[in-house]
Structure formats: C-alpha cells, structure tokens
Image (cartoon, rainbow, N blue to C red):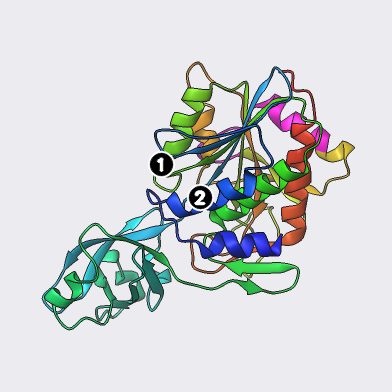
C-alpha cells in the first residue's frame, strides 16, 4: 500500500487535468475488472460484474491547485485557486506546472497574517521579465504542489492524499474482491474539488441503486483541534453527516453491520464542513441512497497531508465486505 500511495501522490492532477492519474489507474486495473471506460467528463469507470444490484463506488482523482490569471512586467505570476486553498498555507511553497516549470509562491509585504489573501501572493518562476515568463507559462496554465512522499512508519505524509488515498482504497479493493455479489461500478471521478462535477454526471449516466464515496475526513486529534470525534489510527470512518449529505440510514446501518461482523475497526464521522462525491450522487435523478467510507486525514488541503495505514487497511476491508455482500435496499 505504501508504494501505491507513493506512486499515486507523485502524479500531478489538479482539477480538470486528470489525464496522467487516469492513465496510471487504468494500467493498474486492466487485469482486475470486466470493463474500463472513460466518459465524456473524463471519469474512469471500472466495471466488475457480480449481481443485479448496481453499486457505485466513487473516489476522486483530482487535487487542489492554482491557475495563472496574469503575468506582470517583472515576470511574476498572479494566480487564483482551484479548489479550497487557504492563503496562509501557500507562502514559500513550491509548485509545478503541467509542462514541468517550477516556481515558489511569494507574498507582498503585510503587517498582519490576517491581511494575507490570494491577491497578495504571486508565483516566482525565476523569470526577469514578462517576455521570459511567457516562454515558460501562459495565462490559464495550472500548477499543483510539488512535495515528496514521507514515510513515517505506520503513517505517511504527501500532497494530494485527498483523495489519492480513496483511489488507493478502491484499487486495492478491486484487486482483493473474489466473489462480488453486485455489479460494481468503481468510478474514479474528476473535478470533485471544484464542485463534485464528475460524480454528478457519472451517477446520472450509471443510475446506480446505491452509491458510496471513498474520501478523507478531518480529525480532532491534534493540539487545540476542532472538536471532532475522528482520530488517526481508530479505523475507517463511517460518515453520518457533512454539509453535502446526511447518510441514508439504511446505508449507515449496512456499513456499520458489515464492519462489526467482519471485525473491522471503525468510527463514526460527523463533519460540520465540507462534502464528498456522495453529496452529488444522492441527489441524482429521483434520488440514490448514498454514504461515505472515509479515511481520517490531518492537515487537509495542504501540501503535507497525513494518514494512518491502519485506517487505510480498515477502509479497504470495509469496501471489500460491501462488494461481497448482496445489497437489498
């Protein structure tokens, strides 16, 4: 699992530019499913047949990033966000553009950190003029954080674990499942970070009987953290509620029962902010019962997100148990 996470997080794929990560996942899954298709939006759908019920799993491939909005006379790049980014987490961070150009984020002089906004930040690519900068990047070019993978033993740190860890869970589950009891539509979605867009169109096209998103969730286990129950190392998190979704009660009961029957460490998640692909799935057409299996993650939407491999393993086991359980709702 460590090697898979390392490889997944090393691939740059900000929202709307998921081609490289999609190709990697396609290569990983070509021998473990019955069909691999890419829809109009760019979602990758891996189908493994097993029964009459259509069960959709969704893990998003994209990550947060930045997009160039202007190039000034000195060659500095002004930019906007792609996805949820806090300005104070950007200063002095390195970014990489799709063509390989590197840069570091600088800031104008401010007297108070509260004054720091995206408008006060710029990307320095080492250019000395607008003309030189324009030979390397253009307005509209997209960059992602450039940070390496850090192995801390039972815990790992990397950029884009939101949601490459969900992708890893789904990939590993597809490799392990031996007796699927449902038709499994394993969807690796695009553009989650900018509004759950890939999940919305994929669910409309698939019209599943049940949808389960695989994503990360925040934790309350660091000094002076928000009062949240989720902790690293306590197992897969079964979502009860976030801003985008109140989990269907039968889905919550199903996931809880499967976790208990299979001795899978688990915890319950109530998140007062944020959302997942399940928020789009459950509002599709006439409505689809939906839930979420989450991996607790520290330092979300930063270049250094952290997860515990015990939680990742618990999530894989719970996904496999769901795949191999006849679904009736």
Q: Position of residue 180 (x, y in %)?
A: 77, 30
Q: Quadrant of the C terminus?
A: top right
- Residue situated in front as seen by the camera: 34 or 55: 34
The extreme front residue here reads 31
Q: Secondary structure at mark 1?
A: loop
Q: Which label sits on residue 111?
A: none
Please tell me which residue lies in front, 114 or 88.
Answer: 88
What residue is at 50 percent from the left and 50 percent from the top? 23
What residue range appears in magenta?
Answer: 241-258
**CA gap, disc 1 to disc 2?**
23 Å
Q: Nearer the viewer, residue 87 or 62?
A: 62
Q: Which residue is mark 1?
A: 195
Q: Which quadrant does the N terminus fall into?
A: bottom right
Image position, residue 25 (x, y; %):
57, 49
Q: In the displayed structure, would residue 325 be above or below residue 315?
A: above
Question: Residue 116: where, in percent of width, then height?
Answer: 31, 70
Lower sequence index among marks 1 and 2: 2
- Towards the viewer: 69 or 180: 180
Dot 2: within a 10 Å radius of its alpha carbon, few (fewer than 14), some, or many (20 or more) residues? few
Q: Residue at x 70, y 74 (%)?
A: 152
Q: Looking at the image, can residue 233 be seen? A: no
Q: Residues within 10 Å of mark 1 (few under 14, many from 20)?
A: some
The image shows residue 135, relative to residue 127, as above or below, that is above
In the image, is residue 17 above or below residue 7?
above
Can residue 157 be seen? Answer: yes
- What residue would you read off at disc 2? 23
Residue 117: horizontal and vertical position, in percent? 29, 66
**What residue sits 28% from the left and 81% below the top?**
111
Q: Secondary structure at mark 2?
A: helix
């Amino acid at each position: 699992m460590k090697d898979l996470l390392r490889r997944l997080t090393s691939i740059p794929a900000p929202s709307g530019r998921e081609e490289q990560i999609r190709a990697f996942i396609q290569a990983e899954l070509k021998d473990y499913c019955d069909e691999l298709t890419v829809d109009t939006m760019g979602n990758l759908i891996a189908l493994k047949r097993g029964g009459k019920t259509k069960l959709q799993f969704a893990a998003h491939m994209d990550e947060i990033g930045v997009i160039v909005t202007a190039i000034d006379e000195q060659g500095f790049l002004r930019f906007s966000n792609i996805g949820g980014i806090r300005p104070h987490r950007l200063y002095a961070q390195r970014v990489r553009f799709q063509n390989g150009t590197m840069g570091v984020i600088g800031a104008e002089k401010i007297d108070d950190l509260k004054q720091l906004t995206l408008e006060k930040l710029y990307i320095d690519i080492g250019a000395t003029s607008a003309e030189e900068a324009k030979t390397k990047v253009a307005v509209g070019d997209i960059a992602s954080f450039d940070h390496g993978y850090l192995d801390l033993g039972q815990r790992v740190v990397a950029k884009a674990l939101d949601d490459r860890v969900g992708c890893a869970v789904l990939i590993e589950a597809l490799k392990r499942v031996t007796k699927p009891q449902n038709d499994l539509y394993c969807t690796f979605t695009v553009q989650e970070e900018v509004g759950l867009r890939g999940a919305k169109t994929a669910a409309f096209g698939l019209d599943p009987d049940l949808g389960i998103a695989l994503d990360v969730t925040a934790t309350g286990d660091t000094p002076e953290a928000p009062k949240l129950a989720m902790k690293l190392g306590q197992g897969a998190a079964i979502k009860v509620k976030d801003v985008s979704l109140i989990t269907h009660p039968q889905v919550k009961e199903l996931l809880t029962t499967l976790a208990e029957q299979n001795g899978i460490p688990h915890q319950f998640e109530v998140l007062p902010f944020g959302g997942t692909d399940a928020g789009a799935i459950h509002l599709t057409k006439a409505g689809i019962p939906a839930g979420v299996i989450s991996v607790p993650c520290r330092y979300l939407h930063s270049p250094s997100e952290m997860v515990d491999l015990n939680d990742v393993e618990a999530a894989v086991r719970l996904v496999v148990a769901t795949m191999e359980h006849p679904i009736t709702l």
